[in-house]
Image (tube, rainbow, N blue to C red):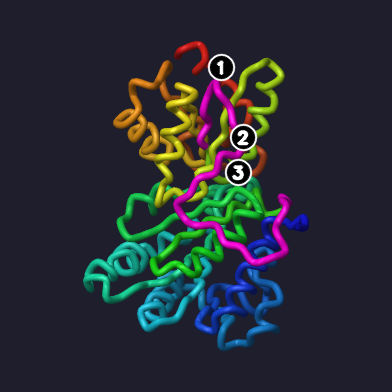
Amino acid sequence: MSQMAFRWAITHAIDEEMGRDPNVFLIGEDVAEPGGAFGLTRGLLDKYGTLRVRDTPICEEAIVGLGIGSAALGLRPIVEIMFMDFIFLAMDQIANHAAKMRYMYGGQVHIPLVVRTLSGGGFRAGMHHSQSLESVFGHIPGLKVVMPSDAYEAKGLLKSSIRDPDPVIFMEQKSLLPVKAEVPDEEYVIPLGQAMVKREGTDVTVVAVGVMVHHAMAAAAELSEEGINVEVIDARTVMPLDVETILASVQKTNRLVIAHEAPAPFGFGAEIAALVAERALYYLDAPVFRVTSQFTPIPVGRSEDVILPNSEHIIQAVRRSLKGG
């Protein structure tokens, strides 16, 4: 076990899977010679050569299209879309082709494609480099959406995503890149669709994803000093969603707060709230509260701090829940 930054966990996962399976290859803008955005693919070109690590033209639709075609023929492409905001340029390929091909061909064709992309705020990079779009892709049948919260999860979930037979949107939040966590030295994978109870509690359930897991843990630690015992669940994957773990927690605590960086309307939190209302409504002693960013584009610079949610917002939501509304 060793300490590893989130960014290097991504690199190690790709390296291990390319070494394990010769069908795995990496394509994207600047992934080869420059070593990738934020250095996430540094050293892979020297190790695996230009046949398996290749820079592409600046054309997201073509990059993903190449990935889909090669996946249909039995390869396992890792496609990088440098920033999630750019992924809309490849939406036809992702939503109308990658997501549908297994269904269209009656399960005879699989698309083992991973689309890696940098998401979220934290770098004050403005509205064209800071979006969180997990709910957009979670709404498309045929896609899996993965959102790790630390280096341990990043490595284990990425390895599972690369081995998965279906297309996966793998979101790497920029604010998490330098954050370190304990990562096993030996081989491991984390199954998709399994949430993790990061902190057990009895008073309020907080379901979070990505960087908001860290804010939830900080909020829980502060609230514990007041005698409030918060249970924190890391969803890990937006699709498939581990509904049973969430329901079991709500049935224990009778209160629910949901935290994610994306805006609230039609989002990940709304889906969880609906599922709890359908299947565990009578366990609730208070309304469900959501902690999200404001419904506005992310501004440039320090102004993003006003838009994005943090631990204090979670603390306020937990207190409202305990008061009953």
Which residue has dot 2 on it?
199
Residue drawn 62% across the image and 61% down it: 155
Which residue has dot 1 on it?
319
Which portion, as a residue range, is magenta? 179-207
Q: In the rendered view, would you say 102 is above or below 48? A: above
What SS does tag 1 mark?
helix
What SS does tag 2 mark?
strand
Residue 89 screen position, x and y as percent: 41, 64
- Viewer-side label of 3, 2: 2
Q: Which amino acid is tagged 1? A: Arg
Residue drawn 73% across the image and 52% down it: 182
Within 10 angstroms of label 1, few (less than 14), some, or many (20 or more) residues?
A: some
Which residue has dot 3 on it?
211
Residue drawn 57% across the image and 30% down it: 231
Within 10 angstroms of label 2, few (less than 14), some, or many (20 or more) residues?
A: some
Q: Which amino acid is tagged 3? A: Val
Residue 9 screen position, x and y as percent: 67, 61
Spatial CA distance of label 2 from label 1 is 18 Å
Q: Please identify the quadrant where the N terminus is shown.
A: bottom right
| Residue nearest the viewer, comparing 22 with 253 | 253
Residue 258 left/right relative to 94: right
| Residue nearest the viewer, comparing 11 with 293 | 11
Q: Quadrant of residue 285?
A: top left
Q: In the rendered view, would you say 320 is above or below 26? A: above
Q: Residue furthest top?
A: 323
- Viewer-side label of 2, 1: 2
Q: Are marks 2 and 1 in contact (CB under 8 Å)?
A: no
**Which of the numbered marks, if any, corresponds to residue 289?**
none
